[in-house]
Image: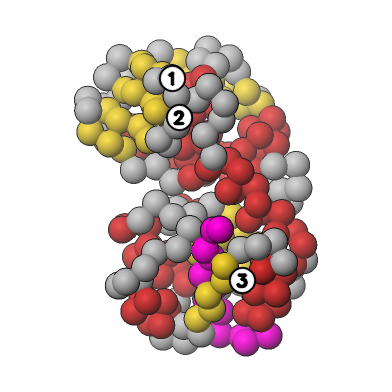
Amino acid sequence: MHTIWVVDDEVNIRELIRRYLEKESYKIKTFANAEELENALVSEVPDMFILDIMLPGSDGLTLCRNIKNKFETPVIFVSARGEEFDRILGLELGADDYLAKPFSPRELVIRVNNIFKRMQPAEGASRIINFGNTAIYPDQRKVTVSGEETNLTTKEFDLFALLAAEAGRSFSRQLLLEKIWGYNYEGDERAVDDTVKRIRKKLREKEASPDLSTIRGYGYRLDV
């Protein structure tokens, strides 16, 4: 059973999320602020976080940064601040998805389910994909460069692994959205661009062999 921690200062939102996710057999813990959650992290780490941005005290963006500095656990933002700047900043901090309030609880359930499905190793995924000094381990969901692990978020790994599995093939942004974010994703193709930008930065910092090429007006391809 997956455990999900929900942080929101509105008790009705916390209980709404709890009610819908518990129907899906998830184990839910709720917190009113970031400090409560961080205190709980001393003894336990959940399988996913659902965070509001506007919180009393430390905000959700700061909380997300602190989480991602320590763990690879997926994060979904559910926030009344739906401006593009907040969405992009949340994704740059490593969040795996973003829903603006008011939101459909059923859509949130679908997005949670999709993230956990993508985290499961695919059949036959035990093979290792090698590109020079870079190795991708689909079953362990990790990437190493010259033997050193590179910290990729859930979305970053899924996108990189997909391109690596079919190196040389050009993928359109729309196809990448459907495969990585799912058919129900309501965001635009900039989510793909933002994720590729972060992957490139992490790979170049370690001087990784493969390169993510931009296909102008179309999408991306992994070149070796």
The residue at which mark 1 appears reads as: 127
User: In the drawing, does residue 132 fall left or right of residue 218?
Assistant: left
Q: Are marks 2 and 1 in contact (CB under 8 Å)?
A: yes
The quadrant in which the N terminus is found is bottom right
Task: Give the mark, 1 or 3, whose residue is nearer the N terminus.
Answer: 3
Q: Position of residue 105 (x, y in %)?
A: 74, 67
Q: Residue at x 39, y 20 (%)?
A: 128
The residue at which mark 3 appears reads as: 79
Q: What is the three-letter code of the residue carrying label 3? A: Ser
Q: Residues within 10 Å of mark 2 (few under 14, many from 20)?
A: many
Residues drawn in magenta: 1-12
Q: Secondary structure at mark 2?
A: loop
Q: What is the three-letter code of the residue carrying label 2? A: Pro
The quadrant in which the C terminus is found is top left
What's the image's color scheme?
secondary structure
Q: What is the three-letter code of the residue carrying label 1? A: Arg
